Image: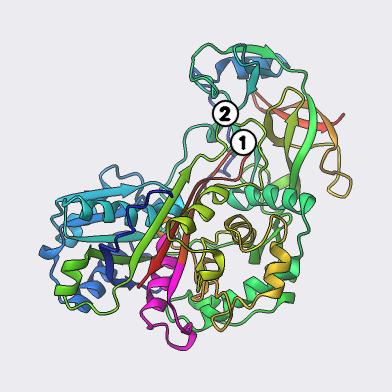
Amino acid sequence: MSEKKKRPVPVPTVTTGPFWDGIKAGKLLLQYDREVDAWQFYPRPGSLKTGKRNLEWREAAGTGAVYSFTETYVPTAGFEDRTPYLLAMIDLDEGVRILGNLFDVTAADVFIGMPVKIAFEKISEDAEYFCFEPA
Amino acid sequence: MVSNFLSGHDVGIVAYGETRVERRSGRTPYEFAAETFEEILTKTGLTPADIDGFATNVPHSESVNQYYTPYVCDYLGVTPRWMDISDHGGGSALAAVSRAALAIQAGMCELALVLCADAPSSSWRAGNGGYRPEFWDPTGIQGPPGAFGLLMNRYAAQYDLKLEALGKLAVAQREGAVLNDNAYEKFRSPITVQDYLDSRMISSPVRLLDCVMFADGAAGVLLTSREKAQKMDAMNIVYPTAYSEIVNFNGAEAQPDITETGFSVVGPEVLEKAEMTPEDVRMFHPYDDFLIAEMIQLEETGWCGRGEGSDFLIETDVSYRGSLPINTGGGQISAGQIGLASGMTNLVEAVRQMRGEAGDRQVSDPANAMVTGIGVIAYGRSWKVSNAMILEH
């Protein structure tokens, strides 16, 4: 019998390495464009506003609000045991949007605009992934 | 006045072909392409050697093959002098037709076949790179239904979303599929609004009957210059008379309105190019991966205001008998989504209707049609490709 498919574990790239180093250290690091005072996510090789490769990594507060959410009834690999589960688009206070699982709240209680903060989940021997919970 | 390379009615569609939609057929995209090719050759009396232009889509079932288009040509015995492949996702068919028209205008070819095929329910050989393996797949998001769950939930928070309006659209399209011999067999029985409401939740608030289902099949159109079309004695020439596309809409915005899409640009623009208003459109064949996407297209193109799509759908007869027929062959939602060949399904139905060949679901006075494409889910936004085409006689 073939082994059950597991939840994918991210493999950092040259572009995303600092982000995942941050997650491992319990920090949310985001790209910041000092020239136009704008944050961006997901990580990219250059600024979405200017095209320049002058971005710096800065630690974000890890707080924000639910922009939208969905409760998933058909699990993807590795999520079978927690179905149904909540996923949300979070608008972080720095001004970027990020997709993650929402824990410690039920679908009946979650609402658009609900304040949340980042949390971390161990997803393999040596990998952590970000998620969110009510603030 | 916006410029319009199709305003001269100088390139026309002279034939179309389409296979039945099948599930887990065990067949390849080459097989389906050959079936549609044979139909078009039979209808026109042409041979493979006559085709000097060829364009297609990237199929899920063969996207590991970086030489897919030359391979299809090899399988079909075609020797094009112009060749193209489109990776606009569900917008690929319209994008390919627009490029084929340009190639004919530029003199690169005379008879261009746009033939879209895919068989993802038999062979899934697709992979997505970029941000997906790190920031999308590990979250457990249920692909397109998950993304549209997020979009639809936000829409419902911002506007007045009436589920019975989406149900009514689902029922109207299903009626078309019942009358469409090429629709997936299991979808060829009527449904009610209650069936829609009762269908199981996939990724809330997206239900099973909000979604398309992947299937196998092919469809295509043959384009040529007006002069050549008339020499071929092709009756019922259907002319693409306007085309617009936008890719990566709101792409540099960090927190855009997820319910706003590229159709806010290309919907009004393609009508302006054709010198039409929404009221002039006889029938609408919108890309239908999810019902909510059709409602948003109606709003952004201008049939009604933002957030008024529910009332518009409740008040309007969108069946083939109605004032604004929508996806009369069932669309993809009720005929099945032939992978990334999907954009061709609704285009072929529009051409079939305009030629008066739609049988029991024929729209009366099929003077024109608007057809659209949607491609590629975006991160934190709606979708990446929006395109639209107007067809006229």
- The answer, for residue B195, to whether it is visible in the render is no
State the image quarter where residue A25 is shown: top right
Side of B26 where A118 appears, left or right: right
Q: Which residue is mark 2?
A: A10
**Residues rendered magenta in the picture:** B342-369
Letter of the chain that mark 1 sits on in the rendering = B
Q: Position of residue A17 (x, y in %)?
A: 55, 17
Q: Which residue is mark 1?
A: B138
Q: Quadrant of the C terminus of chain A?
A: top right
Side of B31 where B376 appears, left or right: right
Q: Are marks 2 and 1 in contact (CB under 8 Å)?
A: yes
Q: How is the image coloured?
A: rainbow
Indicate the secondary structure of the residue bearing disc 2. Answer: loop
How many other residues sit within 10 Å of disc 2, few (<14), some (14-19) or many (≥20)? many
The residue positioned 62% from the left and 26% from the top of the image is: A41
Mark 2 and mark 1: Cα distance apart in space: 7 Å
The one nearer the camera, B280 or A69, is: B280
